[in-house]
Amino acid sequence: MITYPTYKLGEIIDKVSVVCKVKQKEYLTDGLYPVIDQGQPLIGGYTDDENLLVKTELPVIVFGDHTKVKKYVDFPFVAGADGTKIIRPKKEYFIEPKLFYWFLHCVKFPDKGYARHFQYLLKSDITVPPLPTQHQIVSRIESLFAELDKAVEHLRAAQQQLKTYKQTVLKSAFEECANFEKIINYFDVTGGLTKNSQREKFPIRMPYLRVANVYYNRLDLTEIKEIGVQESEIKEKLLKKDDLLFVEGNGSKEQIGRVAIWDGSIENCLHQNHIIKGRPKGQISSKYALYYLISDLGREQIVEVASSTSGLYTLSTDKVRNLKVPYIPLPEQQRIVEEIEFRLSQAEAAEARIAEALQQTEALRQSILKKAFSGELV
């Protein structure tokens, strides 16, 4: 059995010294020279300052000390300021840079959150076969990865098609209602609890929803905080199952339109003032109103009423109270809701299958790398 020499990574790498790095706030959206940092995208931004170029022989690997991101860089670049380590294998060890890059993806790191990880990389062992074998390994890895990339591209395209399909379902459902009367004042609308230091002194403490808990037709209840309340506030601010929750917004057009239904999963739950509660009156069902408001038709209306002369987008209780929904009899509302949910459930099942397939492609990448560095690929 042939055995190859094994080294600690700390023994066989050169660390490239960088005098000047660029802070993220100084990035340009376009420019002459790319900035490589520890973020997920290959290029974090740009700069026009030639003096900031990293002076080193290429290629190199940029390692994110905090993020554990690895980037193979074979073009002139500028280093990002936060947590970037620039390394390359020492020439005397005859290590193909691409093989070294792929090997780094096999290093196991402890879960240290946003702590620094470079120290653990340096302690890892690497086995170095002869250069011809290294070239074969790299060629095989990249050939297999290219096939996986094509599969991932198709899966991502299918994901996007499903997103478009879901909006098409909503649009089609409400196009038939377009000529019906649009009613206002279908909600009993209530603002939420304002935060102030005095609340810490109130003897009654209750769970409450924040903006971080309410998303587009989705609740995230993984972190629920409590707030001090006066007994006189509880009746008005208490949530009931099927209440609609509107995110007030923070001036951003993208944030406006976040609407979800309260599922009643937390007893005696209140809401903060940046969430507006809309309790539908008898002639409009919650789900019918929700699906209309998250459709393109409803979202356009929300954006329109939320806009201001200053260019900011913010909802208020009056703006929510005056939103319009096409009125049809309750049995017809229920029929539309059932049809929407049937079609959306099919789309969501397909999305789940795609998400599972994407996870499998990542597991397959790791399997390929494991085989590559255990001598099973060539």
Image (spheres, grey):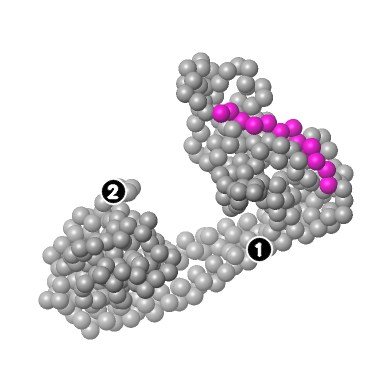
Q: Is residue 280 above or below residue 369?
A: above
- State the image coordinates of residue 31 (x, y, percent, origin top left): 39, 71
Location of residue 213 by image quarter: top right
Q: In this view, does 9 lie above or below 297?
A: below
For the image, the number of numbered tags is 2
User: Of helix, strand and loop, which one carries label 2?
Assistant: loop
The amino acid on which the numbered mark 2 sits, given as a three-letter code, is: Ala
Q: Give the Cα separation between the discs numbered 2 and 1.
A: 39 Å
Q: In this view, does 335 lie above or below 376?
A: above
Say which of 17 and 114 sits in front.
Answer: 17
Say which of 39 and 131 sits in front.
Answer: 39
The residue that appears at 54% across and 24% down in the rendered structure is 206
Mark 1 crowd level (few <14, some 14–19, many ≥20, 10 Å Cα): few
Q: What stretch is highlighted in magenta?
A: 182-194
In the rendered image, the quadrant that contains the N terminus is: bottom left
Mark seen at residue 115? 2
View extreme (bottom): residue: 132
The residue that appears at 51% across and 34% down in the rendered structure is 224
Mark seen at residue 164? 1
In the rendered image, the quadrant that contains the C terminus is: bottom left
Location of residue 281 by image quarter: top right
- State the image coordinates of residue 73 (x, y, percent, origin top left): 31, 72
Say which of 280 and 197 sits in front.
Answer: 197
The amino acid on which the numbered mark 1 sits, given as a three-letter code, is: Thr
The residue that appears at 25% across and 70% down in the rendered structure is 51
Mark seen at residue 299? none
